[in-house]
Image (cartoon, rainbow, N blue to C red):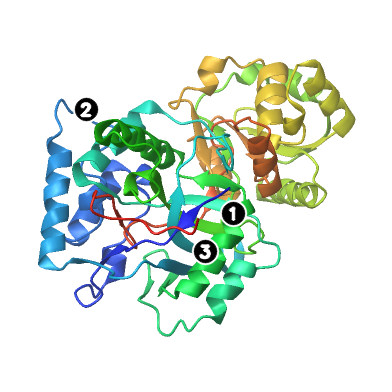
Amino acid sequence: MACIAPLRGIRYNEKVIDRWENIITPPYDVISPQEREDFRKRSEYNFVHLDLPRDLGESTDGDAPYRKAADLYKKWLNSGILIQDLEPCFYYYELDFTLPHDAALHTRKGFICLLKLEEFFSGYVYPHERTFSRVKEDRLKLMQYCKAQFSPVFALYSDPDDYVTDLFEASEKGEPLVRFRDVQGMNHRIWKLSDPGVLKRIGEFFRDRDIFIADGHHRYETALAYRDLKRSELRNHNDPTMPHEYCLMYLSAMENPGLTILPTHRMFVSFPVERWDYFLEKAGEFFEVEKVDCTDEGLEVVRQGLKEALADSRTAFGCACRDRGSLALLMGRTESIFAYLRDSGVAPCFYDVDVVILDRLVFGELLELPVSLLEDERVLHFCRDIDEAFKSLQDGSYSAGFFINPTRIEQVCRVAKSGYTMPHKATYFHPKVVSGLVLFSMDESEKIAGFN
């Protein structure tokens, strides 16, 4: 049973902040060191000062950055830069955005709340990718010193009838608490909902819902670790009123037309080009291979082939080798691919997942690339825009590239419920949920009012 709860959110004081685009940031884990410095210079109140007190790539022997973040957090609370709502709320959030090569305006709808923590696969919360301990250690220290969760986990639920969104839309929303256009041209709007009756109806809806983590696995696992430490320290277990039993969440319906997953094209800085011609020959057993000119016109053939394959739920890849001047479209022979995966011991939930087929069949079997190369971030890069990827190949930044369709949301959920996780960089949910809109105080004095 998924147990969600409202929170007395901590927010930037809208009476003090006049340029939100200089305050709000992307999630900490997609901010480069240079971007971190740029954010710091935009405003003394930019959220990166709290959420990313040190570069994740730098080593530190002490906890000074986290103590500094905690002191700054208290200072902003005491001075009124940050304020806390008096009533428990859900925070309804609309985001307008466009996509590459698509001028249409898309709107993703969701809301920020608390979710009662559960171990993965123990009941209703499912991950879809693996995490790394170094990042979790950083997040845990920040949480311990600040006694707060600064960034929500992005998660999905099923609501084909738009029940939850309709409840929010039917409420007297009034003017948004926050409305701004960010530097990427995306429009953000957020309202708070505190009506006890509506909150309860939304809470009851989630009692039989599964929750699928889309983005923020590190944050969820950090919240679990913090919960276990607090249970040991306070000698209590599973007290549903204690803040350490919860995680800050942004929930969006998986049927929402604004929910978008972008592809993650694989780009090789160096590549064994001597295998290329033999690879294309061998690929004919599993794919229909169409060779095209390695030009913008040829790329358009690849793009259209990928688009058609996505509409037909068929596996397809584009592949290019700069030194061979070669570009090809590979359209999957479904029965041959399934037979290979089955004979290789791959779980059935992966049989139509393109990133798995690319890793196991194309990279592992046909090209015989070593795992060490595929896990070397100096060699293998990821790109979400096929034009940008192809241009980088042509200008010499990369030796070879493999273009892929995005993983579908139903594939993510199916793999997660089967107890498996996706390969690294299998999904890129777009846009990311920004950080700094709503914070969650985990001070022991903060009591949570749930719906059970």
Q: Which of marks 1 and 2 precedes in the sequence?
A: 2
Crowding around mark 3 (Cα neighbors within 10 Å: few <14, some 14 to 19, many 20+) is many
Picture residue at 25% right of the left edge, 56% below the top:
47
Contact, mark 1 vs mark 3 (Cβ under 8 Å) = no
Q: Is residue 97 left or right of residue 417?
A: left
Q: Nearer the viewer, residue 426 or 440?
A: 440
Query: Disc 3 to disc 2, how far (Cα)?
Result: 36 Å
* Residue holding disc 1: 207
Task: Identify the residue shown where x is 36% and y is 66%.
Answer: 88
Mark with earlier residue (3, 2):
2
Q: Is the C-beta separation of discs 3 and 2 under 8 Å?
A: no
Q: Which circle, 1 or 3, is nearer the viewer?
A: 1
Residue 241 drawn at (x, y percent) = 36, 51
**Mark earlier in primary sequence (1, 3):** 3
Q: Which mark is residue 110?
A: 3
Q: Assign a secondary structure to mark 2.
A: loop
For the residues labelled 1 and 3, the Cα–Cα distance comes to 18 Å
Q: Quadrant of residue 265?
A: top right
Residue sitting nearer the eye, 288 or 12:
12
Q: Label 1 is placed on what type of residue? A: Arg
Dot 2 corresponds to which residue? 59
Q: Residue at x 64, y 69 (%)?
A: 163
Residue that appears at 39% across and 72% down? 181
Q: Is residue 6 above or below residue 343?
A: below
